[in-house]
Image (cartoon, rainbow, N blue to C red):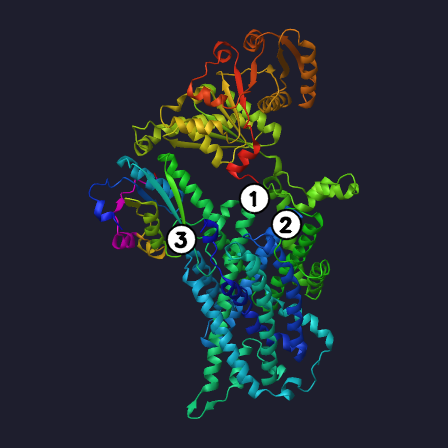
Amino acid sequence: MSDEELAKDLGLVSAMTIGIGTMIGAGIFVLPGVAANAAGPIVVVSFVVGGVIAMVNALSISELGTAMPKAGGGYYYINRSLGPMFGSIAGMGDWMGLAFASAFYCIGFGQYLAVFVGLPAVGFLNPIQIGALLAGLVFVGVNYIGAKETGGVQTVIVFVLLSILTVFAVAGFFSFDYATLAGEGGLTPFGAGAILPGTALVFVSFLGYAKIATVAEELKDPGRNLPIAIIGSVAIVTVVYAILVTTMLGVIPWPELSQDAPVAQAAAAAFPSSIGPIGGVAAAAAAVMTVGALLATASSANASILASARINFAMGRDRIVTNWLNEIHPNFATPYRSILVTGGLIVVFIAFLGRDIEVLAKAASVLHLIVYALMNAALIVFREADTPAYDPDFTVPLYPVTPVLGAVLSLGLVAFMDGIEIALSAAFVIAAVVWYFAYARNKTDQQGVLSEYVRSRGDTLPDQVVGAADAVAPTGTDGPTIMVAVANPRTESALITLAGAVAKHKGGRVLATHIVTVPDQTSLATAAEHKAELDTSSERLLSDAKSDAEAFGVPIETRTILSHRGVTEVFDAARSHDADTVVMGYGGTQFAGGRAEGTIEELTHELPCDFLVLDGGSLDLSDVLVPTAGGPSSDLSAEVARALGDTIGVDVSLLHVVAPGGEDAGRTFLREWADGHQLGDAELRVESGDVETVIGEFGPEYSLVVIGATERGLLSRIVRGSLAFSTINELETPVLLTERPSSRSLRERIFGRR
Amino acid sequence: MTDSADGADRDLLAHALLPVAHENDARRTALALEPYRPERVTTLHVVEKGDGVPDKTPVEQSEEMAEAAYAAVRRVFPDADDHTAYARDILEAVFEAAEEVGASAIVYCSREGNRITRFLSKDLSIGLVTEADLPVIALPSPGSDG
């Protein structure tokens, strides 16, 4: 079995359990009383309408989920499709929606807990809030420690719940009385117009099916299991709700249904007080229901906290939030910071909004509904843009009716919410947009399919549309990492100057690394003991680098790396930091030592990225000479020259060496080459003779000579010292060697760049 | 297992298996092992699976952690191999991996933390030393944080 398959261990039942376990919770155990009070017996229809809206969205999520079985779910699809601005809204919406939902579940837990034990009121918190806070702290604590047993319990809870509810429905069937259901005011005492506001209130009971998509990457055979689990869990839950609510209302007249713990109350009424000689059956049934309610709300809250960590991870991966949030706890192996932050939000929501359970329930629903609407839009964009990578196993029926209907129903339901929840949600949406422009836009490099689509059709679409797409597009895209391997103070400034110029030119950042090579004979532990001395020299070097780079106005990070390997560590560091260009000194290539020569050769034959190797201590840049004969590495030389020209204002001269008599053809080539590399302003020189002689002759007139490695593996030969490159050895002028990996696809294959 | 049969003429550190949890743990363990000059090193990271329930962390994130841990070991032992296992029972996965790669010994550095943290994070030291059918080497921690 491949690793890929081993990582997938959630079967269909587990997936359904996640959906059903999250949905059956505080919604059904708490809200029927409140909702029936506002809508009358017709509230059953409110639940069914909620199920229908959830089902339409479930179809869309199934399609998106089978196309992209990735951690993050809704956020991930929206970010890929509509771009990071909507991605930020979706991520924030999903995250806050989950926090509100969790707070709601905790309040539900508190309400049923208050039935069991007397809780005190503390300060401005009522007893239910105290119970909710305790519950919230426990749920967060369990997730912080990451007790994996909770997961197994979840499956048991769902089956126990479904059994309890079935027994209740059967008992209720026998005590069911239509007259009780219809009551005095008929089925619609407040008119049919009360149905949709009722749905708006109880929709929170359907939040959960989308959570299955957030763990899609762990699902076995997601193409089959994901749609079945999502659609199936919505169908099951809708039926369960319809039966339960009907039963409750047929047992207890709706105006008398408890606002706090209606299921326990209905159970007490549905069961006979004694069966034969066994007394206290009704009281026992009510107690079992209460336990069931506690379990159900606990499992909902638990699943929601876990799902919010997934969304944080997905957002961190796209750099919409800082990855600080997703740090893994060293002992518990849990994303503890994400869990703590979410936990903090839950506590705040319970404390300040927990008095009115409706606000929490509806705020959770509004935020989720916004995300659902965006998800439907994302689906339409994927289909219309005809993205080749978009290949779902499950497709929604009746496209485009289904996604359009999903978006309309979702936003339509928001209209039935109250002002306060809409205002709260709007505040979070605005916060997300502000966050995107203030922070994430410069960090993320994900451009959505929509914006690619719009920007690539700039000619055929109205200017306003293209302008709008440009205005919200991420700016982090063109931010390459220029890694500098600084070795000693003598060359530090020259290397940073080069890296700074390239970084500034491309809008990237500089990563200065000081790789301290420890001889094999010295253990790294011993070396670490001398860390103090090392640190000061390393620190000084890197802080010099920092101030040099900051003089350029480019962002810089610094790192000290202790290693047995010298130059090969440069490759590893370049790889692990995702560097796009490495700048190092020629001297630096010499410290390779005898170890693992084969590895070096192998590595240098397959460069991880562009390499710039400087021979020369200090730079006083005024003009550069770029000899060229074409080829990928001279493309790189041209980029460097352009960067130096643009940022430091050096004059660029291009040199093309030809065989005697080839001057005219050479001139044409060089003119075209200069124009093709946006170096039209450069001075052009075509000379005849031997390449090295000519360079040796003209080089000294310049402050830097930039030479592209025309042969693949040039760098590797320099590293091994097998190449006596006379130009470098004889020239007084600093020489910058450039080498670009010969095949981009090779590099992509090795490093899996997207 | 044939370990007991040819164990006598085998070097204990002929092939050390390093089960590591994360980058710091990997660095600490590798640094602690370094003075003993093992012949061959394989780094093992066990991705803890929920086995029927969602994991504590997304798989992708676990795999990123594994990569970082492998890189940290390679910094000390450039030729170290790596091995990723996916399991709910970490201990069992370590033993299985040891058999699979033909390790001569399992080498670990006890994790930091007080008794309660160790209990809660299910410190595996005891299980490793009591249940293994091959040598298990517990290394002293190389000072604070290597």
* Label 2 sits on residue: A390
Tell which of A516 and A259 is nearer to you: A516
Can you identify the residue that label 1 sits on?
A: A319
Evaluate if marks 1 and 2 touch, with contact meaning CB atoms under 8 Å apart: no
Residue positioned 40% across, 27% down in the render:
A598
Residue projecting furthest to the left: B8
Pointer 3 residue: A332
Amino acid carrying mark 2 in the image? Tyr
Magenta stretch containing residue B129, yes or no?
Answer: yes
In this rendering, position of residue B101 left or right of residue A257: left
Give, as a single range, the part of the protein colored magenta: B125-145
**How many C-alpha atoms fall within 10 Å of the one at disc 2: few (<14), some, or many (≥20)?**
some
Amino acid type, callout 3: Phe
Classify residue A191 by image quadrant.
Answer: bottom right
Looking at the image, residue A537 lies above or below residue A733: below
| C-alpha distance separating marks 1 and 2 | 23 Å
In front: label 1 or label 2 = 2
Number of marks drawn: 3
Closer to viewer: mark 3 or mark 2: 2
Estimate the spatial distance between the alpha carbons at disc 3 and disc 1, rounded to whole Å: 24 Å
Which type of secondary structure does the marked residue at label 2 adopt? loop
Question: Which residue is at a point 62% across and 27% down the rendered structure image?
Answer: A505
> What amino acid type should be assigned to the residue bearing mark 1?
Arg
**Residue B43: x percent and y percent?**
36, 43
Secondary structure state at the residue bearing disc 3: loop
- Mark 3 vs 1: CB contact within 8 A: no
Image x and y of residue B91, in percent: 33, 54
Please determine whether, in this image, residue A432 is positioned above or below residue A539: below
